[in-house]
Image (spheres, rainbow, N blue to C red):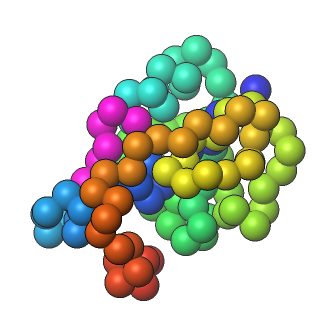
Amino acid sequence: MKIAFDVDDTLIIPAMIAGTKTDVPNYENIAIYRWFQAQGYDMIIWSGGGESYARMWGDKLGLEPFITREKKDWFDDILIAFDDCDVNLADVNVKVKRLNNSISRTEWNKHK
C-alpha cells in the first residue's frame, strides 16, 4: 500500500512562513511519514513543483527510500495522501495544518 506526502507546507515550511532564510523541515509531519515508513508502507513524495523538486526535498530530508510523482502523474493506487490543501488524491485524504495561512505563497511559489 502507498502513502503520499506533498512537499510544500506539508514536509517543509517555506522560509517566508517560518521567518528564516531557508525553507525548514516540518518535523511533526516528517515524524508521521517515518511512522508509516516503519510500518512497511511504500512512501510517495510528490509536488506540483515537479518530480525533481520532490526528489530534491526527499533527499534533503533523508526520507529515502521513496517514490516521487508529479501531481499530473497521479494514479489511483494511493491509500492515504497528506497535503495542506483540500485534495482528492487517495482513498483517504488528510489535510494538514498550514502555518500562517494569512501569508500569501504567490512570490515564494515562483522560485521553485
Location of residue 102 with respect to 86 vertically, above or below: below
Residue visible at 55% across and 54% down in the picture: 85
Quarter of the image holding residue 48?
Answer: bottom right
Location of residue 68 with respect to 19 vertically, above or below: above
Instruction: Look at the image and tell me in which quarter the N terminus lies.
Output: top right
Location of residue 38 with respect to 51 vertically, above or below: above
Residue visible at 78% across and 62% down in the picture: 73
In the image, 68: left or right of 55? right
Location of residue 74 with respect to 2 vertically, above or below: below
Q: Give whichever of 70, 89 is nearer the camera.
A: 89
In the image, 78: left or right of 68? right
The spot of residue 77 in percent (x, y) is: 83, 39
Instruction: Look at the image and tell me in which quarter the C terminus lies.
Output: bottom left
Residue at the extreme top of the image, as rendered: 39
The spot of residue 109 in percent (x, y) is: 43, 77
Q: Is residue 57 in sight in this rendering? A: no
The spot of residue 38 in percent (x, y) is: 52, 18
Q: Is residue 95 in sight in this rendering? A: yes
Residue visible at 47% across and 41% down in the picture: 96
Q: Which residues are magenta?
A: 23-29
Quarter of the image holding residue 93?
Answer: top right
